[in-house]
Amino acid sequence: MSNVAVIGTQWGDEGKGKVVDWLSHRADVVVRFQGGHNAGHTLVIDGTTYKLSLLPSGVVRPGKMSIIGNGVVIDPWALIQEIDRIEEQGVSISPDRLRIAENACLILPFHGELDRLREDAHGDIKIGTTGRGIGPAYEDKVGRRGIRLCDLFDPSELESRLDATVSHHDALRRGHGLVLIDKPKILADLLAVAPRLLPYSDTVWRLLEKERHAGKRILFEGAQGVMLDIDHGTYPYVTSSNTVAGSVAAGCGTSPKSVGYVLGITKAYTTRVGYGPFPSELSDATGRMLGERGKEFGTVTGRRRRCGWFDSVMVRQAIKVAGVDGIALTKLDVLDGIEELRICVGYTFGDDTLDYLPSSPKTQIGISPVYESIEGWAQSTQGARSWADLPATAVKYIRRVEELIGAPVTLLSTSPEREDTILVRDPFAD
Ligand code: IMP
């Protein structure tokens, strides 16, 4: 029996929510290890829809332990709001079921402000961030001036930590012509929210060690996707954390060996929110049709997602850099009824042919996709629960995807409903 890490292999929004929920049913502990409330995971359980951003997907299931690791950046007010909202839906989120790493960094109001201000000022090179302050909060963390959850235990320590952060931000704000930070207000607001947050605070590395020793099954829940990884993604059009499975260990304080199986969530076509290169993007009627059928609007910001054909070169690369063992293929039914499908199998750049996505943004923008045509299927695949329910041409599409990306389909999701899932191999059993 092994622990499982779930990550996205494209630009996020691959349908991780459903798969994580499906797996969390079989796990004892669910851990978030990177990102923040830029993520949006939608779970549909017994007809009720839960929208989670920061809370691990295990919270909606009784008896599961949910953990927010130190690699996550936490907006205290957004977290409290999310807890209150989910509790209003009848789910109890008590400190014995949710633990938060005391060494996790906080997102403060001026992080969000700076994030949005930069986006407005960037003109042609907008990133298209979620505006939640994720990037500026990670910058402060790496700059060693972040405010961490444990700082809230000690008001005088908090005040001196805030001095360092505020003096850095005030210098930036002066340059941008913004009013300076009202430090006493931030301090008072943090001290006011502390009693709500601190009961969840824990030494997560110790807790995880204990759970591992007790033989508990752990599910590490990634957010975003490999192509949004700060190192391996389409930089600078990326998020500010490492989204690859390699960040599990650092993001919650556990051994890299604690992950036995890496499941890469992969959509049967490609989408992206925000700006940046997208070689197989379709700006035509087919692209719009994929968006409408796939309900491709952002969970967090409501933005329309850009859509395109499946890019096997990009997914193969994501699988290699992130150490993916097998994929969960989602939203195959969105391709139902399309006569001729296309899969991107390579790129050209000038006279060169490429079998990988190079790092230079200029090349990433300038490359053209090389497509392979593949016959579509007329029948519906929605709700299929066994391979026998799938048209032969759909199976052929899946087999070709596996061949091109060099990884097997471990699980196939055929609708947002939890039961509409075909399991090829149990990732926890490896
Ligand atoms: P940030 O994470 O808010 O800084 O945004 C950086 C980039 O990552 C932008 O292109 C966002 O649209 C994208 N992004 C961040 N979180 C998600 C997500 O959960 N799904 C898809 N894209 C995301």
Image: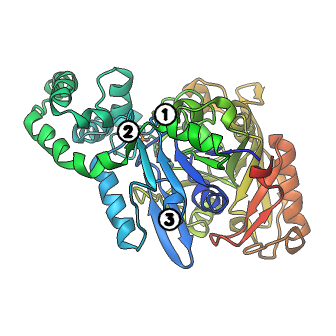
The residue located at (39%, 47%) in the rendering is 130
Residue 383 x %, y % = 73, 75
In the image, 254: left or right of 53?
right
Q: Is mark 1 within 8 Å of ligand 1?
A: yes
The answer to whether one can see residue 238 in this image is: no
Looking at the image, residue 305 sits to the left or right of residue 28; the answer is left
- Which comes before the other along the chain, label 2 or label 1? 2
**Residue type, label 3:** Val
Out of 45 and 128, give the one closest to the viewer.
Answer: 45
Instruction: Tell me where residue 335 sits by quadrant.
Output: bottom right
Q: Percent from the top left, x then y, of residue 218?
A: 63, 47
Q: Is mark 3 within 8 Å of ligand 1?
A: no
- Whole-number angstrom distance, CA of label 2 to CA of label 3: 25 Å
Label 2–label 1 contact, CB within 8 A: yes
Task: Kindly report the distance in space between the C-alpha atoms of the residues bearing marks 2 and 1.
Answer: 9 Å
Residue designated by label 1: 241
The residue that label 2 is drawn on is 134
Which SS class for mark 3?
helix
Residue 294, can we see it?
yes
**Considering only order in the chain, which callout, 3 or 1, is on the residue closer to the N terminus?**
3
| x and y percentages locating residue 31 in the rendered image | 54, 46
Compared to residue 293, the image places residue 325 above or below, namely above
| Residue nearest the observer in this picture, 215 or 268 | 215
Q: Position of residue 25 (x, y in %)?
A: 63, 63
- Residue highlighted by disc 3: 60
Q: Going from the N terminus, do you reach mark 2 or mark 3 first?
A: 3
